[in-house]
Image (spheres, helix red, strand yellow):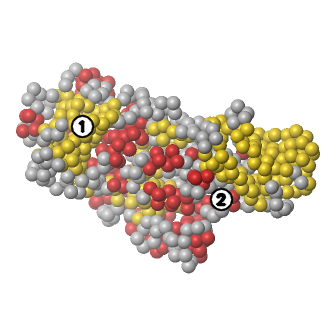
């Protein structure tokens, strides 16, 4: 069992029998002063906490990447889907605009502009321009007849001209026309127009526009990149999620305009032209100094499906002298990426697999992965819900030789269970870890590769994130990896699916979980010391709670009130205490540091996040939920007052 599981849950059985609901707990708690007690024995051997608990999951969902992190400003760049109806509008005066059915690169559609002494063109609105900023872009053109003139126009939201760039055609074959301009004003609702005038006809395809500096530096939106960077992910899982099960990696490498078009059928059916593909993702991981975890599609045991997945592995890791290494080199990346983490598909139960049939997939794909990358860490899919232990057990028993990490998913879908849901998840993870240790494959690691409080992004999501991360730190090293979901989503998407980062095309704001994830990651310490759960009735002489800890009979213990954990650095010179008060009344965390390693002199800083349950940030008010920091007086006995619905981090540095 985990470090506190038996004590907590045996006590809880007696206490909660008389507590019918959370409202009863809140009523009882409000009537009296309550404390949680955390005794930290610095002489006791500490236990390692895996930094991979602080991973992230970048899924192609709700415009997290397309019209999100990927900095392309043009939507519907290639006209393959309903792009013309959705994102573009025609301009015509003595001219004609139509979608033409013909091949271009990997596409089947282009836009034809035909003019007879007038003009014809296309316009896209909702372009964000920054002040004194250079923009670069291009479009592909093919002249058909006559000699029409082509112009790129950039208009402000009031109709003012920001830029007018003539585009000179060069022959009648398809060719790329680059353009650039500098905006001298900020406009969040500018428009871009591509207009033909004079006489003749031409074809247009694959229009692109980005900030010049961004185009040449990874093509990532700076504000969202900085938001992700602040989370300091130890690894990033990509590209999905359900999206991974149908992902065509070969169509997302190479020249941007020649990549494939695939509607995002799982998450809104919006256009995706694969501008953010393998090389862009690996560039992101290098920039953030984190491990990539690649999710391979594994739809069947057919040879062609297996080869397709394994060729991706070859592309990632083979030397430049091989077939796939040469392709990677042609795409500008001669050195192998040396990816170590691979997951075999995602939530296969959604695609009709039984645990037995999926275990068969793992055996086939896992063996091939080990042959290609002997040092690979292979992830198999565990249960999707905490009550489905049968799935995980069968995958362990049947395929345990061919994977290293069992990646489970666990969302809490009822926002009011922001506190109680954590104990439910703790129980199943504890049981799963115990099953692994008793199995024929005791070295399998357990991971939670999707988790969060869903259906709200208010402060309840933050409280849930705090309790979850405290739990995951406590369960380590039996639990080695976690990454919450969702990471990013556009504010215009389905509000049912909630996220850590919310953005429109201009800016972003943090969900309730983001501020906690950031605070806890910034104050990570890799060795476990002690933890505490629940509160008891206060006593006049609090010293007794420490001096008589072994014999003192606690009174009125309440679960789902406070969770706390103490961790330390490798050199024991930095101690971090994290705590969360789930309740609507003040609770107090009493801390005692004892043992020879407890510092005599130290500095301390307290970081506090306090909000009302339903508080939430917005584009207009992004700082509604934010930490406040202040110096804290150090002593070996500490009292930390936790206001209602508070997350706290106390960091102690030995002098």
Q: Is residue 257 left or right of residue 543?
A: right
Q: Is residue 486 left or right of residue 89?
A: left
Task: Tell me the mark number nearer the camera, choosing from 2 and 1.
Answer: 1
- Which residue: 21% across, 57% down? 571
Q: Secondary structure at mark 1?
A: strand
Is tag 2's residue or tag 1's residue first in the polypeptide sequence? 2
Residue at the bottom extreme of this rendering: 321
In the image shown, does 577 or 453 lie closer to the viewer?
A: 577
Q: Is residue 330 left or right of residue 602?
A: right
The residue identified by callout 1 is 631
- Cβ atoms at labels 2 and 1 below 8 Å apart: no
- Which residue: 68% across, 54% down? 261
Task: Identify the image quadrant of residue 451.
Answer: top left
Q: Percent x, y for residue 542?
A: 11, 31
181 lies above or below 11: below
- Which disc number belongs to residue 473? none
Q: Is residue 278 left or right of residue 102?
A: left
Packing grade of label 1 (10 A; few <14, some 14-19, many >=20) is few
Q: Secondary structure at mark 2?
A: helix
Q: Percent x, y for residue 85?
A: 75, 41
- Which disc number belongs to residue 256? 2
In the image shown, does 359 or 344 lie closer to the viewer?
A: 344
25 lies above or below 78: above
- Which residue: 46% across, 68% down? 338
**Distance between the Cα atoms at labels 2 and 1?**
51 Å
Packing grade of label 2 (10 A; few <14, some 14-19, many >=20) is some
- Which residue: 85% across, 57% down? 143
Q: Percent x, y for residue 431?
A: 31, 50
Res 100 visible: no
In the image shown, does 634 or 367 lie closer to the viewer?
A: 634
């Amino acid at each position: 069992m985990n470090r506190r599981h038996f004590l907590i849950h045996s006590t809880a059985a007696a206490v909660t029998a008389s507590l019918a609901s959370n409202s009863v707990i809140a009523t009882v708690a409000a009537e009296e002063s309550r404390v949680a007690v955390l005794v930290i024995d610095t002489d006791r051997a500490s236990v390692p906490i895996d930094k991979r608990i602080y991973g992230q999951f970048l899924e192609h969902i709700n415009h997290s990447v397309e019209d999100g992190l990927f900095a392309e400003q043009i939507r519907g760049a290639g006209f393959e889907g309903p792009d013309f109806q959705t994102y573009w509008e025609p301009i015509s005066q003595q001219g004609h605009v139509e979608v033409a059915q013909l091949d271009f690169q990997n596409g089947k559609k282009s836009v034809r502009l035909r003019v007879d002494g007038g003009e014809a063109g296309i316009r896209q609105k909702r372009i964000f321009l920054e002040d004194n900023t250079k923009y670069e872009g291009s479009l592909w053109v093919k002249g058909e007849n006559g000699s029409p003139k082509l112009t790129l126009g950039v208009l402000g939201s009031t109709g003012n001209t920001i830029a007018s760039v003539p585009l000179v055609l060069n022959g009648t074959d398809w060719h790329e026309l680059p353009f650039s301009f500098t905006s001298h004003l900020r406009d969040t609702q500018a428009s871009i127009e591509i207009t033909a005038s004079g006489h003749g006809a031409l074809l247009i395809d694959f229009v692109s526009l980005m900030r010049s500096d961004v185009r040449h530096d990874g093509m990532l939106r700076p504000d969202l990149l900085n938001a992700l960077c602040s989370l300091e992910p130890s690894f990033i899982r990509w590209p999905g999620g359900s999206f991974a099960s149908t992902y065509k990696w070969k169509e997302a490498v190479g020249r941007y305009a020649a990549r494939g078009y695939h509607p995002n059928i799982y998450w809104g059916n919006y256009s995706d032209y694969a501008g953010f593909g393998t090389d862009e993702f690996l560039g992101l991981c290098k920039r953030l100094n984190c491990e990539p975890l690649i999710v391979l599609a594994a739809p069947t045991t057919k040879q062609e499906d297996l080869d397709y997945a394994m060729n991706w592995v070859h592309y990632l890791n083979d030397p430049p002298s091989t077939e796939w290494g040469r392709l990677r080199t042609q795409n500008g990346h001669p050195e192998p990426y040396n990816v170590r983490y691979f997951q075999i598909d995602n939530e296969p139960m959604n695609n009709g697999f039984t645990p037995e049939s999926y275990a068969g997939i793992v055996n086939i794909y896992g063996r091939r992965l080990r042959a290609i990358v002997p040092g690979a860490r292979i992830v198999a899919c565990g249960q999707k819900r905490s009550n489905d232990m049968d799935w995980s057990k069968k995958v362990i028993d049947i395929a345990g030789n061919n994977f290293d990490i069992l990646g489970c998913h666990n969302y809490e879908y009822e926002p009011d269970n922001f506190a109680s849901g954590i104990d439910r998840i703790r129980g199943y993870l504890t049981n799963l870890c115990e099953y692994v240790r008793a199995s024929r494959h005791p070295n399998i690691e357990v991971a939670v590769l999707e988790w969060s409080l869903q259906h709200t992004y208010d402060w309840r999501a933050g409280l849930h994130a705090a309790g979850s991360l405290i739990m995951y730190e406590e369960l380590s090293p039996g639990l080695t990896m976690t990454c919450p979901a969702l990471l990013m989503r556009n504010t215009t998407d389905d509000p049912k699916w909630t996220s850590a980062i919310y953005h429109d095309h201009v800016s972003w704001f943090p969900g309730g979980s983001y501020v906690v994830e950031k605070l806890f990651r910034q104050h990570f310490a890799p060795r476990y010391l002690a933890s505490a759960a629940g509160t008891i009735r206060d006593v006049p002489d609090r010293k007794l709670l420490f001096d008589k800890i072994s014999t003192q009979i606690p009174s009125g213990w309440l679960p789902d009130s406070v969770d706390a954990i103490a961790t330390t650095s490798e050199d024991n010179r930095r101690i971090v205490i994290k705590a969360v008060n789930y309740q609507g009344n003040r609770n107090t965390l009493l801390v005692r540091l004892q043992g020879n390693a407890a510092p005599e002199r130290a500095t301390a800083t307290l970081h506090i996040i306090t909000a009302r349950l339903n508080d939430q940030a917005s584009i207009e008010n992004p700082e509604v939920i934010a930490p406040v920091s202040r110096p804290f007086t150090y002593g070996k006995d500490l009292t930390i007052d936790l206001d209602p619905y508070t997350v706290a981090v106390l960091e102690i540095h030995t002098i």
